[in-house]
Amino acid sequence: MADYSYKLPAPEVVALPGSAARLLVQEGNGAAALLYIYILSGHAELDRGQACRALHMTAEELDAAAGVLVRLGLLEQHAPAARPQRADELPEYTAEDVTREIENGTAFRSLIEEVQTYLGKILSQDDLLRLFGIYDALGFPPEVIVLLVSYCAQESQRRYGPGRRPTMRQIEKTAYVWEREGLFSLELAERYIRSQNEKHTKEAEFALALRISGRALTATESAYVDEWLKQGFGPDAADIAFDRTVTGAGKLDWKYMNGIFKSWHAKGLHTAAQIQAGDSRGQSAPRGRTAAQTQTPAAPTREELAQMQRLLDEINNG
């Protein structure tokens, strides 16, 4: 291996306090260290979207890194100021805006062709305006938009069956989710898609354990399953919960089953083995009788037999 030497250039200096450097090295969290350097380099007021783009982090990863800095006392966390939530709406573009972009020879022309191929149709004027908004207003690179459209097409088929294509409005709504997650690079978008696919696989396994097949979970059902998955339950636990729910409620009652999972989670029981060992429902005594009353009577002693015989003799001789 070649013996390289390295030299640090002399760019703009960013002052890193020694105490902070020691804390970051001791913590060993590269994302937190990178975020701290980013903040020191002129971003005291942290804009999450801008930081996600600059650091190639998802919103979740950025929040986790910021949480480490807060815990180390290197970053102050303030409650967000009350402000109206930004509406998920694109600016009002015109056909002239789109035409101008195409004539300027940017990547937008090629993007249109790629999207039309995925959707299997020629985009309408409304579709073009929405696509241009995702490209221009939300600021996604063309290659990420192509991946976004591909992901939406995959999700549409998963939920509604083969051959179903997403609308541009559905793609636009998903784009807002990706914007909030900071998915502005292929690497982050691909990582997000992998995590979503893994989540859907686990949901499908859970659904089969609950005897649900041939359809996607509803939004409410999916929310329940996601929560149980986060708590550490798997299909084996779902199978037991299904049996107890149908036995107790007479049907698949999601609230009833959620109560079962809550009880197990509170007891730290998550696998089938843990549940069977720590929350077994064995044969109980008949209702209204105590355990002592259901025990087999002990055989009489010799003295008790002799006393009984004396009583019988007295009765017979009386």
Image: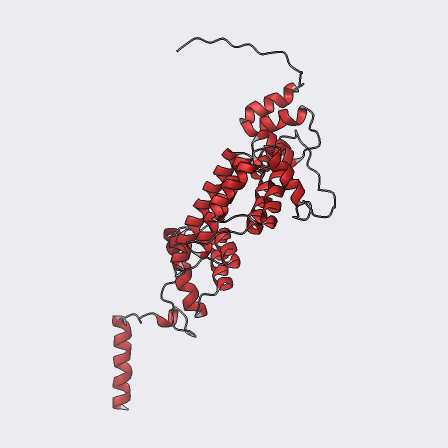
Q: Residue furthest bottom?
A: 318
Image coords of residue 75 (percent x, y) = 67, 31
Evaluate whether residue 232 shows in this view. no
Quarter of the figure that contains the N terminus: top left
Q: Between residues 317 and 50, which one lies in front from this camera angle?
A: 50
Please give the name of the residue rendered at 47% of the width and 57% of the height, measured from the top-left corner.
Answer: 217
Q: Is residue 160 above or below residue 27?
A: below
Q: What is the image's colouring?
A: secondary structure
Image coords of residue 15 (percent x, y) = 67, 18
Q: Between residues 296 and 276, which one lies in front from this camera angle?
A: 276
Please give the name of the residue rendered at 41% of the width and 9% of the height, measured from the top-left corner.
Answer: 2
Image coords of residue 64 (percent x, y) = 57, 36
Quarter of the figure that contains the C terminus: bottom left
Image coords of residue 79 (percent x, y) = 71, 42
Could you tell me how many numbered marks the image carries?
Answer: 0
Quick check: 37 left or right of 265?
A: right
Q: Between residues 105 and 200, which one lies in front from this camera angle?
A: 105
Please give the name of the residue rendered at 45% of the width and 41% of the height, measured from the top-left corner.
Answer: 194
Quick check: 219 left or right of 293?
A: right
Q: Quadrant of residue 252?
A: bottom left
Evaluate whether residue 299 shows in this view. yes
